[in-house]
Amino acid sequence: MPAEKESKQELKYAATLSGVITLRMLGLFLILPVFMILAQDVRGFSPQAAGIAVGIYGLTQAILQQPFGWLSDHWGRKPVLLLGLALFALGGVVAAMAESMATLIAGRALQGCGAIAGVAMALAADLTRPERRPVIMAIIGIGIGGAFLLSMGLSVPLATLLGLKGLFWLTVVFAIMGMGLVLTIPSIAVPVEEPVSENAFEMRPVWMLALSVFLLHGAMTLLFVSLPPMLVDQFGFSLAEHWKIYVPAMAGSILFMLPILRKVGTRHSESKMLPWAFIILAAAIGILPLSASLAALGILLAVYFLGFNLLEAAMPALLSRITGSRGRGRRLGIYSTFQFLGAFFGGVAGGMLLGYYGSEVALLVAAAVSLAWGGILKWSSSSVFPTGEEK
């Protein structure tokens, strides 16, 4: 197949998978900004129960990422994607029909059982060439970021129009639309299962990247726990106006991110970029508390999003290349497990630090951890990550 036609086909697959993940993440994100208020009318409501309902999907996601990855290596990617979306839809139905907090928590947990993030990344890797994967992963990452930004702008108007039950029914619609998109993707034959090496030396890159995405999403969740109170208290920005900061910052980061990823993908140099992206991210988070104006804060957020999006795209691309095709789904499942665990623990840590010490200390802790991890990657990456073409 000519290279130009192959590139267009890869972009088409990436856009389709991005659409699948975006619809699913939008269904999750739309609930978050309004849940604590709307759930007060549900029987058995308490702040503790509502907190469990908000966070439980992250735990079930983390627990099931690796089993879903293993299943995708045996059954194929598409059947497992369809199964995960069906579980997400079923969880939405349970939550929409819930009359008590216990049932609502069960529905949210069931939504999280559709743990397809690792499977979707594995399918994206199956359908693309190694040198194109950073850009392909970036397109998927942009979809996730877009889902977050859309949720910030749409959650309050939709909640006013539909109520909590209506929002959950909307997640069911999103899941069904995602299943329709999956059916348009060609089936990829899964290689006959052979023993995959699990010795400590060969698994080092997997665990290093798993820890990296744990810290990346931990810092991200902590940031969005700590930053909104700053915007309200220090800058007088109501929640309904926060998108005016997030959207331009995300858009500005994308302009710089894509050219960098094209160069990185061509040179297979993701591992060399990782430490610097963590350092960029740490610098942005660390300086945020010192922002004296909304303009400065917006620039720093753009720098943060640049570092975050570079890592979000480069790390799964690097993992898929160095592990090869066999066992890819299960290993990307390990990666996704740590991604959701990071988000869960970042939220818990962010809430504790915010409550006891305030936003500034919380952000400085996230910056310090990110900077330290960037140093560790800089020191160890050459010995941990192999170079060269895909296995």
Image: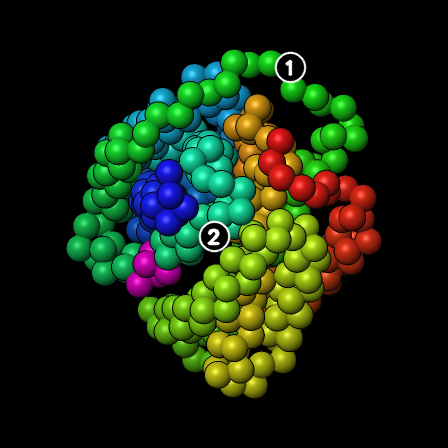
Identify the residue at horizontal 55%, vertical 14% (top origin).
193
- Where in the figure is residue 351, as x and y percent of width and height? 58, 55
Specify the quadrant that holds the N terminus. Answer: top left
In the image, 81 versus 218, the foreground residue is 81
Give above or below for 91 relative to 287: above
Upstream in sequence: badge 1 or badge 2: 2
Q: Looking at the rendered structure, which numbered label has been put on residue 135?
A: 2
In the image, 43 versus 351, the foreground residue is 351
- Here the colouring is rainbow
Magenta stretch mostly in which secondary structure?
Answer: helix
Identify the residue at horizontal 56%, vertical 53% (top origin).
266
Q: Looking at the rendered structure, which numbered label has been put on residue 195?
A: 1
Outermost residue on the bottom side: it is 292
Which secondary structure, mark 1?
Answer: loop
- Where in the figure is residue 281, as x and y percent of width and height? 62, 64
Residue 4 is covered by the magenta coloring: no
Q: Which residues are magenta?
A: 148-153
Distance Cα–Cα, label 1 vs label 2: 31 Å
Disc 2 marks a residue whose amino acid type is Val
